[in-house]
Image: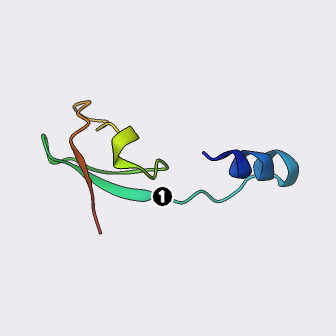
Amino acid sequence: MSTIQTLKEVLFGTVDTEQYNYQCEVCHAEFTSEEQSVQTVACPECGSHNIRERL
């Protein structure tokens, strides 16, 4: 979560966070995450960082 989003949440309550769709290249699990960069996302099933964004 970005600093701006965190400040908005503190000041104004819950903020709708954007969800990004990913697929693991190792186990093919499909999942969503609040992380925008595929470089910081790990597969919740197998832990791999070999992830691609689903469009």
Residue at the outermost bottom position:
55
Judge left or right: residue 11 versus residue 52: right
* Residue denoted by label 1: 19
Q: Position of residue 9 (x, y in %)?
A: 77, 49
- State the quadrant of the C terminus: bottom left
Residue at the outermost top position:
47
Q: Position of residue 28 (x, y in %)?
A: 15, 48
Task: Say which quarter of the image contains residue 16.
Answer: bottom right
Q: Tag 1: Cα neighbours inside 10 Å, few (<14), some, or many (≥20)?
A: few
Q: Position of residue 26 (x, y in %)?
A: 12, 40
Residue at the outermost right position:
11
Residue at image point 59% right, 56% down:
17
Q: Nearer the viewer, residue 54 or 3?
A: 3
Judge left or right: residue 2 versus residue 32: right
| Position of 36 relative to 48 (above/below) | below
Residue at image point 74% right, 52% down:
14
Total of numbered circles in the picture?
Answer: 1
Tag 1 secondary structure: loop
Residue at image point 22% right, 31% down:
46
Query: Which color scheme did the rendering employ for the protein?
Result: rainbow
Q: Position of residue 19 (x, y in %)?
A: 48, 58
- State the quadrant of the N terminus: top right
Q: Nearer the viewer, residue 18 or 50?
A: 50
- Badge 1 amino acid: Gln
Task: Say which quarter of the image contains residue 27.
Answer: top left
